[in-house]
Amino acid sequence: MSQELSENEYRNQRIQNMEQLEAAGYPAFGKAFERTARLDELHASFEEGRGVKACGRIVAMRKMGKMAFAHLNDGSAKFQLMVKKDILGDEIFAAFKLLDLGDIIGVEGEMIVTQTGEPTIRIASWTLLSKALLPLPEKWHGLQDVETRYRQRSLDLIANPDVMEVFKKRTAVMRAIRAYLDARGYYEVETPMLQQIAGGAAAKPFMAHYNALDIDVFMRIAPELYLKRLIVGGMDRVYEMNRNFRNEGLDRTHNPEFTALEIYQAYGDMRTMQELIQGMFTHLAETIFGKMEFEWMGNTIDLRTPWREVAYHDLIREHLGADWFERSLEEAVAKAEELEVFIEKGMDFKQVTHEIYDKTIEGSLIQPTFITRLPKELVPLANHCPDDPDLVDVFELIIGGKEIAPAYSELNNPLEQRKRFEEQAKGDGGKIDEEFLVALEYGMPPTGGMGIGIDRLLMLLTGSDAIRDVILFPQLKPKS
């Protein structure tokens, strides 16, 4: 078949093949097919001479005079098929040769080993389950165009086995996280995705209108305030593997719809979460990936513990000078300009400092690092440090220059919480979650809480450079 054929011409040829198959008694879109096992299981339990039934998509085909070989792929593995005219008979063999790459078939036959030593199913009968009307990507180069890969993820999964492996690993990681937490007595819960107040984080929300109540609602930016209400209610360990939505930009590490894990443990604190995340991450690395070192964005990252811990102010002094916090606002702005960090008019010294940290220091922290004792203005939902009310008892876990997880010793003083909400709302009382504050007034025990960006974690563990590579259907600009 000519390489110059257009996709439409390929499609027309496939439709002609489909019509010939239907005329030969092979309906193009068949019914359910009962198979012996998935192809990976057939490989694992291979037994020469065993009769089996298998099904999948034809991903390779070599047709000869009285024989044909094909590779079947059902998403779990590939398995070679041998098709012989003297076994099938003239008509059935001729029909088989009308099949195209991408067609989905079911086969019944016997396991054999070919002269080259490859496990093979020598088929005695076959049935057409679904006719592919469009061709798969070119055999040797696969699906390479990045835009097409994201827009047509189904084709990407067929054409690129490494992409399929990433998403199998994603499923395995999420399953393992749940098992890890379940084994430690945590309850998995679900909280509202439509909220009347966008609380729990500082981010721009997506808005919607709820017709039945005639009110505006927000897609949640975080489930935090609802999960804490469950702690008040006596569920002492809770977690939610949740979808969050933030009406913000797209880049290599941000997607407006993303997966996060939030965890809360009553009678714990930031240290409780610190121990939990180190144990969880090393468990995932060892059990799913079988290693502790990962290549990510040009860096080798070692997840072996202990991980570094450094106070925010000490880290600033390391990078900006031991006298940094004795400098004036004008000197801080001048340093920011020297480092090519944009400073908005009206920023105070703490804001300028954090902008420099965010743009120049955080990205330099490659190995796992806990940044602790942050200024309270940065984290309005955390408890203060016992020895300094201007700092909060938190950590931000940075790996590969990216924030992977923040954790807090949660603020459980309702009076202080109201004060911080009011400072954050800047006079807009509609932004204060009164129901949450009422819940706090019934008493919330000391609590440790943590959020983990699952997509960024998957980027690290799979060595992916873009968040779109670990999200099956990332947000994309409409086609022009």
Image: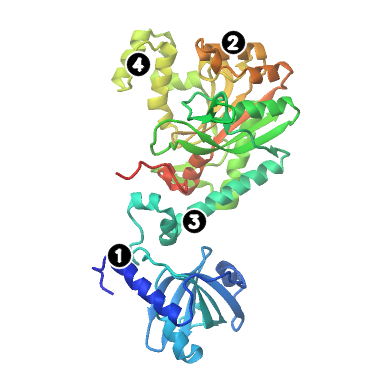
Placement of the N terminus among the 4 image quadrants:
bottom left
- Height in image: 421 above or below 193? above
- The residue at the far right in this view is 234
Q: Residues within 10 Å of mark 1 (few under 14, many from 20)?
A: few
Name the mark nearer the viewer: 1 or 2: 1
Q: Earlier in the sequence, mark 1 or mark 3?
A: 1
**Mark 2 to mark 3: distance in Å?**
49 Å
Secondary structure beneath label 1: helix
Pointer 1 residue: 8
Pointer 4 residue: 344
Type of the residue with mark 3: Glu
Where is residue 247 drawn, in percent x and y?
44, 30
**Mark 1 to mark 4: distance in Å?**
54 Å
**Foreground pick, 238 / 10:** 10
Q: Are marks 1 and 3 in contact (CB under 8 Å)?
A: no
Q: Earlier in the sequence, mark 4 or mark 3?
A: 3
Q: Are marks 1 and 4 in contact (CB under 8 Å)?
A: no
Type of the residue with mark 1: Asn
Mark carried by residue 165: 3
Pointer 2 residue: 419
* Quadrant housing residue 116: bottom left
Residue at horizontal 33%, vertical 18%? 336
